[in-house]
């Protein structure tokens, strides 16, 4: 019984430490989320430090998260799975997921063996890259999976490649194209350009692919950000699209839609089933269906998500 109480206290301390040092909550916010007094929250944060559960990152594995990760790994035959605590007040906050995605990038880029890292775009990817510490990685190569030009011709605000290259000094290879072209014929012509072909060949050899997953519904991010029109979005929905991975629209079974905006897309092809490590970093109730689709279709073989999303994925 005493041992169980001790484990429970350490788990609470680990949660408090995660909320304070990684998610950036105040002690008052931690007290509300853990439903304890402010004094108790302060003691838990102190215990987390004194027990060395946290140094630069949280070292104590939260049991509930580990169990969820193990079940997801078994259900979807994953090569990598991490589950972080859900922020009860801000359930769509990407801080924790971005932190673990950043740790994956860092560990890959600190390895001595030269690696090719391919990365998608979006808010979660951008947040992850911002947490990567500066380092010198001249032997590694970074390649984008998505075009870096917005519909108005400007550089995409959520392009992550240039920022990661600034932080790591690694050679980087953007996709110097709009995300969508005017027609399939134009796309076929552009993809024959030598520099574009070379970038696509490099992406195909990537040792790690790190991507986000977006929902395709009336509130789809690609629509809100102006990459597709309402009519184009509705067409994809009629074709059965439920989500997108690097802007490739997929249906509920994880099949790439044959038609619609996919015919004009310049993103790197999706190897199906994923061969090398391909990790999606995504969370939230609106993402459950597209995440499940990407897992079922074996578009990704790795997942970084939060507790609430993991529980929803396991209910299916």
Image (spheres, helix red, strand yellow):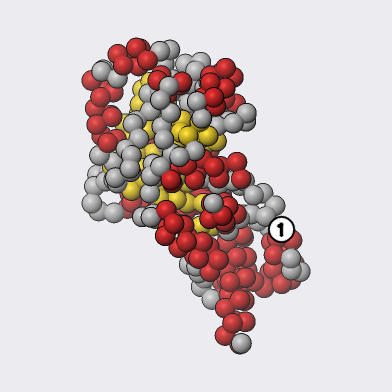
Task: Report x, y in % for residue 78.
Answer: 39, 54
Q: Where is residue 99 in the image (x, y as percent from the top left)?
A: 50, 52
**Residue at x-position 35% and y-position 16%:** 187
Task: Please say if 186 is above or below 49.
Answer: above
> Taking the image as drawn, is residue 11 in sight?
yes
3 up-or-down from 23: above or below: below
The foreground one among 80 and 42 is 80
Q: Give me the residue at 47% from left, 42% from top.
A: 293
Q: Residue at x 25, y 24 (%)?
A: 197
Q: Position of residue 316 (x, y in %)?
A: 54, 51
Q: Give the answer, above or below, for where 225 lies relative to 22.
A: above
Residue nearer the viewer, 205 or 129: 205
Q: Is residue 115 left or right of residue 217?
A: left
Query: Height in image: 284 above or below 163?
Result: below
Picture quadrant of residue 31 = bottom right
Horizontal side of residue 39 vs 213, given as left or right: right
Residue topped by disc 1: 29
């Amino acid at each position: 019984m005493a041992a169980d109480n001790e484990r429970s206290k350490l788990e609470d301390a680990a949660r408090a430490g995660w909320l304070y040092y990684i998610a950036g909550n105040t002690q008052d916010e931690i007290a509300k989320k853990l439903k304890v007094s402010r004094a108790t929250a302060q003691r838990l944060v102190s215990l987390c430090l004194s027990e060395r559960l946290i140094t630069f990152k949280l070292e104590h594995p939260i049991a509930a998260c580990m169990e969820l990760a193990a079940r997801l790994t078994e259900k979807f035959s994953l090569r990598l799975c991490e589950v972080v605590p859900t922020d009860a007040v801000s359930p769509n906050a990407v801080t924790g997921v971005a932190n673990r995605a950043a740790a994956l990038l860092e560990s890959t880029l600190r390895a001595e063996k030269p690696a090719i890292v391919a990365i998608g775009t979006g808010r979660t990817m951008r947040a992850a890259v911002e947490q990567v510490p500066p380092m010198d990685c001249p032997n590694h190569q970074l390649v984008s999976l998505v075009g870096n030009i917005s519909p108005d011709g400007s550089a995409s605000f959520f392009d992550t490649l240039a920022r990661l290259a600034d932080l790591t000094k690694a050679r980087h290879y953007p996709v110097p194209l709009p995300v969508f072209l005017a027609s399939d014929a134009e796309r076929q012509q552009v993809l024959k350009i030598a520099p574009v072909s070379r970038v696509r060949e490099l992406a195909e050899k990537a040792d790690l692919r790190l991507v986000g997953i977006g929902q395709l519904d009336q509130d789809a991010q690609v629509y809100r950000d102006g990459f597709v029109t309402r009519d184009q979005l509705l067409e994809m929905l009629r074709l059965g699209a439920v989500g997108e991975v690097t802007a490739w629209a997929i249906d509920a079974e994880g099949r790439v839609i044959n038609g619609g905006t996919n015919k004009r897309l310049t993103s790197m092809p999706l190897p199906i089933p994923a061969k090398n490590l391909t990790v999606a970093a995504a969370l939230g109730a609106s993402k459950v269906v597209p995440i499940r689709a990407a897992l079922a279709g074996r578009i990704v073989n790795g997942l970084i998500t939060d507790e609430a999303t993991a529980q929803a994925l396991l209910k299916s």
